[in-house]
Image (cartoon, helix red, strand yellow):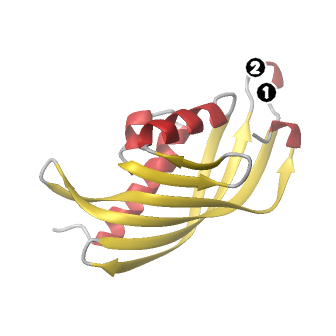
Amino acid sequence: MATSDHELIRNTLARYAIGVDFEDWDTFSKAFLDDAKITFQAPIGTLSGISAIKSTVKAMVGPFQTQHGMTTQLIEITGEKTAEATSYVTTVLSRTGKDEGKSATMSGYYQDKLVKVVVDGEVDWKILERKAFNRGTPTGDLSLSP
């Protein structure tokens, strides 16, 4: 049975969250094209290329255990090999060690542009461009917010 484009896209979006949360940077990297761009709100701004994206995200989450909950999604196929997706995200940042038990929760959403590719003979989707937005006010121990 063939996997639908929508399911392949959901898996691609999940690679970002699972990759970060499990510090599995190979899985994380598979979510993106090599020349992808990701734009975070200030002060980070726009990052270009998977190496810059990966090293910056590693540094952002380095001192935390994270859990990304990606919920409501709207996926639209915009062309034969293009799609756009909007996903809500809630991220819990937790400390370990002497700060164990301290956590902060942030909410926002991702807007993604994706491209259909063939990897090792299999059809897949990769993120070409991601814009990450914060929404609302973070809660919890705000001294933990990156």
Q: Residue at x 43, y 44 (%)?
A: 49
In the shown orientation, is residue 99 left or right of residue 28?
Answer: right
In the shown orientation, is residue 107 left or right of residue 75?
Answer: right
Quadrant placement of the N terminus: bottom left
* Residue type at the position of mark 2: Gly
* Residue 67 position within the rendered picture, expressed as x and y whole percent measured from the top left: 62, 45
SS of the residue at dot 2? Answer: helix
* Residue 72 position within the rendered picture, expressed as x and y whole percent measured from the top left: 57, 71
Between 60 and 41, the one nearer to me in the picture: 41
In the shown orientation, is residue 144 left or right of residue 80?
Answer: right
Quadrant placement of the C terminus: top right
SS of the residue at dot 1? Answer: loop
Marks 1 and 2: CB-CB under 8 Å?
Answer: yes
- 66 lies above or below 15: above
Q: Which mark is residue 44?
A: none
Residue 141 seen in the figure: no
Q: Can you tell which quarter of the image residue 5 is in?
A: bottom left
* Residue 6 position within the rendered picture, expressed as x and y whole percent measured from the top left: 35, 71
Q: Residue at x 44, y 72 (%)?
A: 84
Residue 24 seen in the figure: yes
Q: Which mark is residue 97?
A: 2
Q: Residue at x 58, y 36 (%)?
A: 56
Instruction: Check disc 1 and report the residue beneath it.
Output: 100
* Residue type at the position of mark 1: Glu
Query: Which residue is situated farthest in the top direction here?
Result: 98
